[in-house]
Image: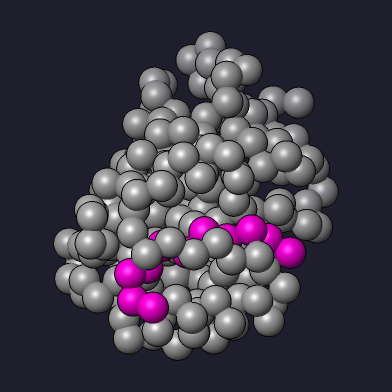
Amino acid sequence: MAKIFFIEDNKAIREAVTSYLVIENHEVVEFDKMAGVPEALTVQNPDLVILDVMLPDGNGFKLAREIRMKSDIPVIFLTAKTSETDRITGFEVGGDDYIIKPFSPRELVLRVRVILKRKAGEKGKSENNMSWELNGKRLTIDILSHKVSIEGKEVLLTQAEWEILVYLASHAGIVISREILLGESLKYMTNSSVRTIDTHIKNLRVKLGKPGWIETARSYGYRFAGDRKK
């Protein structure tokens, strides 16, 4: 069971989605506006946030940015904003998924299930810790604890960023196309485009800092540049 914050001003949508999530044995805390959410996040520490973009007292993108500055809690945007620019913005501010209204509550529950499962850590990995070095810096991925660190300092990633980094690092030295990254690491994002990958990569590069852990293969994809260490 997970604790889920659901911020949505439409009562009918809140009730419908909540009923489906409760059937999945999740605990849902509902909000009809942004006010009070930051404080509640600090106190209750939810496992996932479902967030409308257009709220009566503010913009969900702004709230997501505030959340991401303090936590790696998965955020799913639920919105009527349909343009590609809006979707890209959603991922730039740290969203893990972007669902456009009208939508199927069953599909939303499925995406929640997949994100929570991946957040708990990938199973079936032969190794729990992976480390790489590049220009004197060491990057470590701990599969079980779902943490990434550079020189011992933890780097907070979104679920999507985590999936992309793990996939690239697991295929270090190999150029991976945007299409493969989209299909293999972000399987649950059915409305995503290859531009989504570019946005996540840009965010990853900022968070990972120098040196350049992720290289660009122009007009094709990306390559993880670190050298594997034991």
**Residue under the image location 69 percent in, 25 percent down:** 229
Residue 80 x, y percent position in the rendering: 25, 75
Q: Is residue 150 left or right of residue 130?
A: left
Judge by depth and name the residue closer to the eye, 108 or 14: 14
Q: Is residue 3 magenta?
A: yes
Q: Residue at x 28, y 52 (%)?
A: 61
Position of 94 relative to 178 (above/below)? above
State whether residue 85 appears in this view: yes
Whether residue 134 is in magenta: the answer is: no
Which corner quadrant holds the C terminus?
top right
Res. 225 visible in picture: no
The residue shown at (29%, 55%) is 60
- Counting from the top left corner in percent of width and height, residue 18 is at 55, 76
The answer to which quarter of the image holds residue 133 is top right
Q: Residue at x 39, y 21 (%)?
A: 210
Q: Is residue 54 above or below residue 167?
A: below
Q: Residue 144, percent across and down?
A: 76, 43
Measured as percent of width and height from the top left, residue 50 is found at 45, 63
- Scheme of colours in the image: one colour
Q: Which residues are magenta?
A: 1-11
